[in-house]
Image (cartoon, rainbow, N blue to C red):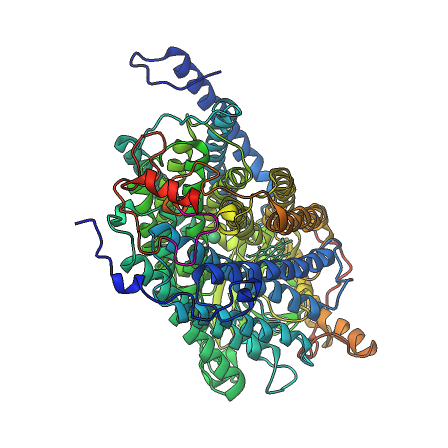
Amino acid sequence: MTTTTNNKSPNVGAIVIIAVAVALNLVLAVLMARWSYSWFPPQASSAAPYVDDLFALETGIGSFLWFGLTGVIGWTLLFNRAPKYDESYGEPIEGNNRLEITWTVIPTVIVFAIAIYSMQVNDKLDALGPKQKYALGTDPATVAAVDPRATVGPIDVIARQWSWEFIYPDGVRSSELHLPINQRVNFRLISEDVNHSFYVPAFRLKQDIIPGSVISYSLTPTREGRFRLRDAMFSGAYFSQNQTDVIVESDEAYSSWLKATAKQPLQPGLSPGSDLYAKRLANGDKGWATVPPAPAPLVNDPGDASIPHDA
Amino acid sequence: MTSTKFDPRILKAPHPVPGAPDNWKRFFSFNTDAKVIGIQYIATSLLFLLVGGLLAMIVRGELITPPADLVDPTVYNGLYTMHGTVMLFLFLFPVLNGLNNLLIPTMIGAPDMAFPRLNAAAFWLVPVFAVLLMGSFFLPGGPAQAGWWSYPPISIQNPMGLFFNGEQLWLLAVALSGISSIFGAINFVTTIVRMRAPGMGFFKMPLYCWTAWGAQIIQLIGLPALTGGAIMLLFDLSFGTSFFRPEGGGDPVLYQHFFWFYSHPAVYVMVLPVFGIFSEVFTCYARKPLFGYKFVALASFGIVFLSLIVWVHHMFYTGTPNWMRILFMFTTMTIAVPTGVKVFAWVATLWGGKLRLTTPMLFCLGGLINFIFAGITGVMLGTVPIDIHVGNTYFVVAHFHYVIFNAIVLGVFAAVYHWFPKFTGHMYYEGLGKLHFALTFIGCTLNWLPLHWAGLLGMPRRVASYDPEFAIWNVIASIGAFMLGVAAIPFILNMVSSWARGPQSPPNPWGAIGLEWLLPSPPPAENFEDDVPTVINNPYGYGLGEPQVADEEYYIRRAQEA
Ligand code: HEM
Ligand SMILES: [Cu+2]
Ligand SMILES: [Cu+2]
């Protein structure tokens, strides 16, 4: 049985055990931090690497703390158990001011360091522009676009119950979002009904869309592929279906898509809610109350929901 | 200076109401005895834990496969909304008020609450809004479907255009719950401030009372904001106003401020008493004084203060300007400090103790390591760039269930077992208790650990269907959830059979220190009656050999002879 006693002379055995435990815990924390990169979808925007680095740092610090504290608790479970029928007390230590100061100051320093680092990462994301109000029912196009650094856009992103519509500066309309790689693109996020959220996990970016406001939002895609855009703010009955794809492609592919699409006639685009609602009506309108879906947007490129996404 | 003035008039208040029945019927009457009310609260809330759990089982049943194939998506939305609402307003708040009723008067040596009739009124509002909420299932359009946040505009869309609708009943129920909580809070705060035993200065008060006090102060500050927001929303829904309606120039985001100004601190209303439970249980079963009692007590109020200035961390991606996001990130991060003080104190209390792994101790140990985990994911969520990615995904669902179930509910179970002999007069069965713990701990870990990964990969919350790449995490989660359903069986069996025919409990079966353990089990209607002990030492003097009260031997004998 190991007991913890108050030896006045330094206890070499204890110091060795603590040193080994701390070293092991550090190794574990670094391994966890490295592993954490694999928990995300691929990095497809200029923001993603910064977010993943910050998360890895937090995973490392968090793992060190959690394994450390759980380890200490586990130690007490193994070595500080009262034998059956032992009614005695543990050593009646009532506290220690030096320890209290230590575990107040060190966590304060850690969380402020994390906060300052996060602030810098947040500057790097540099995605959120101003939120400008307008009277719902008037044309949101009257609200001026505001990101001079963007080389693409502004693309109007219109979220509805339950469909997405993207309108390009030259008037091209699409159900899927095509973007050229490595260019800063600016969006005007617009909703005509309820709150929605523009969320592309591979970009690590999310912005709620608020009816009655136009929100300027910018990002730079850095990886070609087909990525999922998910509505992330609950928006009613068919909320979970309110998704489409973002297609990041080379400059040439993007320009030729724009040119070709401009020649297409307008047709109903993706509207997963409408299909499901039609099914519900066909089955006798069972279920609880819902508003009917907004009519499918009329677009030049209706997209193709059957193509699998990369992430 | 530290000894309180004791108002003898309160002692003489007639309790229970003259003529109140003293058999089982008293639990179904407007009884004003805090110990009866406490049990009324706890029994009612455990019933609703079953209801909320059942709703969760259907929700997890739907989510075991990617498509929405078990229930219609509208039904799914109603079920998850009602699950959250029932769990918070009909299970967790009432169960904690039940514990407050049992523990506060007995721990501070008061005969009852300060305002016994207000206390009973607070309880009887619970069945009233429970009926409203459950009744909404039977309305033509079904219950509320907008989530427990009830954000406009979705919450005020009222698809069927009927005046009476699920959302309306939901708002009324939440407002009534708020009124009930305010009644409770007035009572708890007054009782703690005015009715402590002679000699019990604030720094001789048990930590459960400190934390309950802090929690109830939050209720008094925050609930008016929520209730105000709910009433404005009700007007928008039912009477055509435009506080939050964008068509009329209202601002939907304004509601979010009202809501979170209360609902972030509400998390601390729920978790603070559990911090108190941890402090009671760890000292008792580690047989050691609490490490740094004063720091742990004061940290409670550090948390109360900070909890009131962090709410915007729920709105990092709603268009909140950058300076405000940064400001609230810093305030949010600082909460980790007082919370850390408590966590380190508990671990130091365990260190070198004589641990007895009884059922309540196991639940608290499990709850503590889960809480540490949840604190770490909480700091992650508090940093703006991480929250922008994982906010409103299953990472958040996993985080808050780690707090609310894996830590808070485990702590509540610990409390129920620890004080069961005191208030029923019977011992519970340790074997069934340990089985309950094992199933709960494994079940809750399977249920919520994997969902963190689903969230990191980008699975939004509140979805009735999802892309197949998330399936594996959801299958494991559903298995864990069903295990939690099974865990209810040994718990119910234990409670019912122990109360009916468990062995008689002595006044102090655990060798615990605290005024409540100087009372007979169960305590008489007015606790110490006219003979209230005088407190002379700190609580948790385990192993110090100092009696907590003057003439301790006398009180121990008196309880044994009763
Ligand atoms: C019995 C085990 C439980 C299971 C299996 C469970 C499962 C779930 C699931 C699947 C959701 C939906 C998450 C989402 O999509 O956002 C949810 C939401 C929620 N749960 Fe639980 N839960 C359990 C216990 C609890 C408890 C004990 C509480 C509180 C005391 C609680 C409070 C909530 C809340 C507040 C929500 C959010 C509802 C909303 O988004 O409006 N749950 N739960
Ligand atoms: Cu919060
Ligand atoms: Cu949290």
A62 w.r.t. B412: above or below: above
Position of A222 with respect to B316 (left or right) is: right
Q: Is residue B87 magenta?
A: no
A14 w.r.t. B497: above or below: above
Is any atom of residue B430 visible in this view?
Answer: yes
Q: Residue at x 38, y 60 (%)?
A: B112
Q: Quadrant of ligand 1?
A: bottom right
B127 w.r.t. B304: above or below: below
Per the picture, the main secondary structure of the magenta-coloured stretch is: loop
Q: Residue at x 31, y 61 (%)?
A: B11
Residue B342 quadrant: top left
Where does residue A295 sit, x and y in percent of width and height?
A: 69, 79
**Magenta span covers which residues?**
B519-527
Where does residue B268 sit, x and y in percent of width and height?
A: 42, 55
Observer-nearest residue: B161 or B244?
Answer: B161
Where does residue B311 sit, x and y in percent of width and height?
A: 40, 60
Position of A233 with respect to B71 (left or right) is: left
Is any atom of residue A270 visible in this view?
Answer: no
Position of B181 with respect to B134 (left or right) is: left
